[in-house]
Image: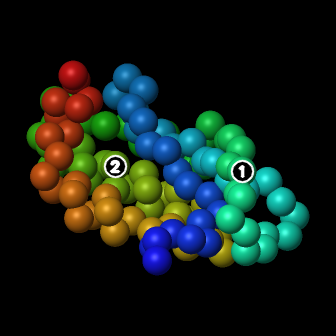
Amino acid sequence: MWRYNEIIGYLRLYFLGTQVRAEYWRVNRKRIVRTRRKIFQFWTWKVAPETELPVNGSSAEIYKAVQEHVESCRAALKGRFVDTRQLTTIGHYIDWRALLHG
């Protein structure tokens, strides 16, 4: 069984200059029911205000800023569960500095 069968939305993280932002995509329904045919629609460009990244920061500092942004998105999405297990699992191994400046 797939872990995310009942997903109702997701965040797409991206860098814009020296900021990290999150788009929000969700199921556009008044009542969310179990179905296999979910269609996700773009909902908003910003869930939470942008988080400024350290320009000359280390990869660990950039990763910490990304985590802070995800936490602010979690606070903005009250009543929703935001699963960050994948980000916390692989986040330490990503070269965030190269990703930001690449």
Number of labels in the image equals 2
Q: Position of residue 17 (x, y in %)?
A: 37, 23
Q: Position of residue 82 (x, y in %)?
A: 50, 67
Image vertical order of residue 77 relative to residue 39, above or below: below
- For the C terminus, the image quarter is top left
Camera-near label (1 vs 2) is 1
Gap in angstroms between the C-alphas marked 1 and 2: 27 Å
Q: Which mark is residue 66?
A: 2
Type of the residue with mark 2:
Val
Looking at the picture, the colour scheme in use is rainbow
Q: Tell me if 62 is positioned left or right of 23 in this view.
A: left
Type of the residue with mark 1:
Ile
Q: Position of residue 39 (x, y in %)?
A: 71, 51
Question: Could you tell me which secondary element the residue under label 2 belongs to?
Answer: helix
Q: Quadrant of residue 34?
A: bottom right
**Residue depicted at x 68% and y 65%:** 36
Q: Quadrant of residue 89?
A: bottom left
Mark earlier in primary sequence (1, 2): 1
Q: Nearer the viewer, residue 52 or 39?
A: 39
- Can residue 68 be seen here? yes
Q: Position of residue 91 (x, y in %)?
A: 22, 55
Image vertical order of residue 38 relative to residue 25, above or below: below
**Disc 2: CA contacts within 10 A as few (<14), some (14-19) or many (>=20):** many
**Residue depicted at x 16% and y 30%:** 98
Q: Which mark is residue 7?
A: none
**Residue depicted at x 51% and y 69%:** 4
Give yes or no for contact between labels 1 and 2 (Cβ–Cβ under 8 Å).
no
Q: Residue furthest right?
A: 30
Mark 1 lies on residue = 39
